[in-house]
Image: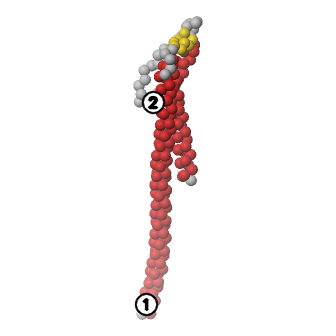
Amino acid sequence: MIYLFGGVGVIVLLLTVALGFEHERVVYETNRAVKAELTLKAAQDRATALALLWSAQVDKSEAEVNQAKDEANVQIAALQDRIKKLPSRIVVFSTPAASVLDDATAAANAAPAPAVDNKPAPPVPDPAIAGATTAYDEREFADYVTRAAQAYRDVRTKLGACISFYQNLQKEAQ
């Protein structure tokens, strides 16, 4: 009988040891799962923070661009008023000079937005015609130059906003 109790005792001891090992394995795996959940939560929080930062930076950049456009529009409107006061005179350019202006216009419009269907540019005057001239109304020419300046300023403003957006986002994300 003593052997029976001893055998049962050994079996109980082995089961207790096995149960202890299994308990430790479960605790280890549970801790690993909790750590993975915490890591996931931290990553989700970081992603949310970056998304909020991105959104705030977009809003800030849009506000800066809109403010710069408003300032530019005030300046351009003042220039447009001055253009209206110009005398009605003709500005005469030689054909080569007019050709350069036309080529500059064509180059500026060479890469339109994909959704825009532009007509082909008008033919460039032949500079080989010696002594030929091209006449522009002074007001129209001033308006053309002013619109070109406005477009250039708009592009510079947006480029500056893109650079500022990226730099601020990079600085805030660190």
Q: Nearer the viewer, residue 29 or 38?
A: 38
User: In terms of secondary structure, where does tag 2 sit?
Assistant: loop
Is disc 2 surrounded by few (<14), some (14 to 19) or many (20+) residues within 10 Å? few
Rendering coords of residue 82 (x, y %)? 50, 25
Q: Nearer the viewer, residue 21 or 121?
A: 121
- Residue for badge 1: 5
Q: What's the CA distance linking mark 2 and mark 1?
A: 91 Å
Residue shown at the point (53%, 32%) measured from the top left: 153
Residue 115 sits above or below residue 14 on the image: above
Rendering coords of residue 20 (x, y %)? 47, 78
Rendering coords of residue 27 (x, y %)? 47, 72
Residue 144 visible within the image: no
Residue shown at the point (46%, 55%) measured from the top left: 48
Residue shown at the point (55%, 7%) measured from the top left: 132
Q: Nearer the viewer, residue 24 or 13?
A: 24
* Dot 2 amino acid type: Ala
In the rendered image, which quarter contains the N terminus? bottom left
Residue 82 sits above or below residue 97 on the image: below
Residue 96 visible within the image: yes
User: In terms of secondary structure, where does tag 1 sit?
Assistant: helix
Residue shown at the point (54%, 34%) measured from the top left: 156
Q: Earlier in the sequence, mark 2 or mark 1?
A: 1
* Dot 1 amino acid type: Phe
Residue 171 sits above or below residue 11 on the image: above
- Residue for badge 2: 113
